Image (cartoon, rainbow, N blue to C red):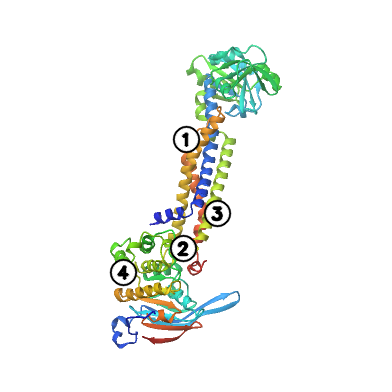
Amino acid sequence: MLKPTRIFPSSNSPTLAGERLLEPILQTENLWKVYRQGKLEVPALRGVSIDIFPGEFVSIMGPSGCGKSTMLHVIGGLAQATSGRVLLDGNDLTTMSDSARTLLRRHKVGFVFQRFNLLPTLDAYHNITLAQHIHGNGFDPHRFQVVADLLGLSGRLKHKPSELSGGEQQRVALARAIVSEPKIVLADEPTGNLDTKSSEAVLGLLRQLNQDLGQTIVMITHNPEAAAYGHRVLHMRDGEVVDGSSVH
Amino acid sequence: MIRYMITQNVLHRPLRTFITVLAVAVEVTLVIIVVGLTSGLLSESAKRIEGVGADIMVQPPQASYLMAFSGAPMPIAIGDKLAQLEYVQAVAPVLTQFNTSGIEIVYGIDKESFNAVTGGFVFHQGHDLRGLDDILVDDVYAKSKKIKLGQTLQLFNHDFHVVGIVEHGKGARLFVFLSTLQEMGGAHDKASVFFIKCDRADHTPAVTDEIKELLPRYEVRPLRDLMSLMTSSNLPGLTAFINVMIGIAVVIGFLVIFLSMYTTIIERTREIGVLKALGASKGYIVRIVLSETTLLCIGGAVAGVGLSFLMSAIFIKVFPTLTILITPLWVLRAGLIALVGGLLGAAYPAWMASRKDPVEALAYE
C-alpha cells in the first residue's frame, strides 16, 4: 500500500506562508493550448492558472486526455502555449523562442518520464552525466556522488538500461533529472510502467529528494495513492484545473 | 562525452556500421585505384619514353603526351628535314599503334635510326628484327603473357614471330618494323613521332627552337620535361575521367551516409526527444550526428586505404604490366573526398534531427 509518511503543508498553510513561498517558482495565468487537427481546433488546456512554490511537491491528477501531459509539456517548455502566460523562475515561456526555451530547460527543468527514456547505448553513469554535459558546467563529481548515493545507484552505474530493472531505470532517470540541480522536476507518470514495489520505491525517492534537497517537484499521475505523496493535488478535467484545494 | 556517445552508437548497430564503413571504403578505394591506375599508366609511359634515350620528341599538332592517344601521323619526309638541322645527331621515326586486345602500344621502328637514337636494345634472348613479320617483346610483357622465343604472336589479325626478348624501357613493349606497321595501318610513309638525339645534351634547347621554327604548329617536347608533363592534369581527357570517377565516388558516399544516418535518426527519434528535453541545442544534436558520420568516414577511409593496397597487389599479380601509383597525396585526398561526401550526406539527417519537435519525438514508438 502506497502511503506517504510525511505530510507537507499546502502553500496556503500559515506555517509555510513565509518569504520563500511568496514568489512562486512556477506560475501559469489563463493558459491555453489548442491543437489543430485539420480544420478542427482541439483545446487541450482551457485557461489553467496555477502557482507552484519552491520546495513544493505537487501532484496533478486526472483521467486520460484531460490535458495533464500537455500541461507538463507547456510548463516544462517542451511545447509552446497558444495563449496565457507561464512564468518559470521569473521567465515568461510564452514569449520565448524555441532556442531560449531549450536553454531554460537545460538550466532550470528536470524531466522524468513514464517510459524512463534512458539512452539505450549509454550505461547508467553516462546517462546521468549526459545531463551535466548538456548543462555545460562540466562534470561535478561531488553532486554526482550525492545523487548516486541518494538514489542507491552506486553499484549499478556500469550497467546499460537493458541490464537494469524498471525501478532501477527510473532511479537513473531521476538521477539524470536532478544531477544538474534544476529549479523544478517535472515527472510524467513516473510509476506508470512500474510494479507496486518499484513504484513505492520511486515515489519514496521523489519525496526524499523533495525533503532532503528541497527539490520542487510536479508529478502527473492517475493513481490517487501516488498522488498522495505530494503536498497537494491538483485535479484536472477537460483541460481545466477543477480542484486545486486538496491538501494533505 | 560526445565521443563516448557516438562510439556507443556506432557499436550499437554493428551490421549497419560495417555496411556503412564498407561503402565508404569502396568509395575511397575507387578513387585511389582509378587515380593510381591513370597515374601509374602515365608515369610508366613517361619512364619508357624517357628510356628511349632521345633528347626531343616531335609529334603532330595537338598530339597528346601519351602517344596512344595521338592523332594522325606525320609524313615521314619531315624526318629528313629534321636530320639536316644543326646539332642533330640522329632522327628515329616511329609509328605507334594501340593494341586494344592487350592495352599496349606497338612501336613500328626503323632499326638503324632507332638504334642510333636509343643505343640499341639489350637482348635477353634472340636477335634483332630481320623479317617483316618479326616482332620484339620486352621482358615484362614476355613474362606476363608467358611468351617464348620463336612463338607466334597475333596482333592486329597478323601473325608475328617473336625473334627477340629485350630489356624493358625503350618506349613500348612491342616492336615491329616501321614498314610492316605502315602497311597494316594503311599509313604509308607516315610516322607518329620522331625521336631526336642531339650531338650534345646541352644543345637540346637550341634544337627545340630550330624545330619550332621549322614546324611551327607541331608538338616539340624536350624529353627531360616529359616526366613533369606526364600528370593527369596535363591530359584534359584523363582529368575529366578522374573527375567523373570522383564524382561517382562522392555520390556513392553521399547516398550511403545519407541513408545510414537518415534511418539512424528515425530509429533514434525518441532519444533525440530526450536530448531536447534535457536542453540539448540544435547545434549539440547536429554535432552528435556529424561526429558520428566523421567517425564512420574515418573508419571507411582507413579501411579503404587498406583495401586499395590489397586491390593494387591483386591487380598487379593478375596484370603484371599494370602500374598502380598510390601516392600519399591521393590517399589523403580520397579520405577527404569521402569525408566531405559523407558530411554532405549527413547534413540533411542532422538538420532533420535538430528540428524535431521534442513532444512528438518523445511520443515516438
Given the image, on which type of amino acid does mark 1 rest?
A: Thr
Q: Which amino acid does label 4 sit on?
A: Leu
Residue placed under numbered mark 3 in the picture: B259
**Residue A97 visible in the displayed image:** yes
Q: Which of marks 2 and 3 is nearer the N terminus?
A: 3
Q: Name the residue under label 2.
A: B271
Work out whether A238 lies above or below A179: below
User: Dot 1 surroundings within 10 Å: few (below 14), some, or many (20 or more)?
Assistant: few
Q: Select label 1 or label 3 by which is in front.
A: 3
Q: Nearer the viewer, residue A90 or B132?
A: B132
Looking at the rendered structure, whether the residues under marks 1 and 3 are on a common chain is answered as yes
The chain holding disc 1 is B
CA separation in Å, label 1 and label 3: 31 Å
Could you tell me how far apart the alpha carbons at marks 2 and 1 are, in whole angstroms?
Answer: 43 Å
Q: Foreground: B196 or A140?
A: A140
**Residue A150 badge:** 4
In the picture, measured across the screen, residue B147 lies left or right of residue A137, that is right
Instruction: Please give the residue where the numbered disc 1 appears in the rendered image.
Output: B327
Quadrant that contains the N terminus of chain A? bottom left
Secondary element type, mark 4: helix
Image mark for residue B152: none
**Mark 4 and mark 3: span between their CA atoms?**
44 Å
Task: Report the side of B34 relative to B5 (left or right).
Answer: right
Q: Nearer the viewer, mark 1 or mark 4?
A: 4
B38 lies above or below A59:
above
Quarter occupied by the C terminus of chain A: bottom left
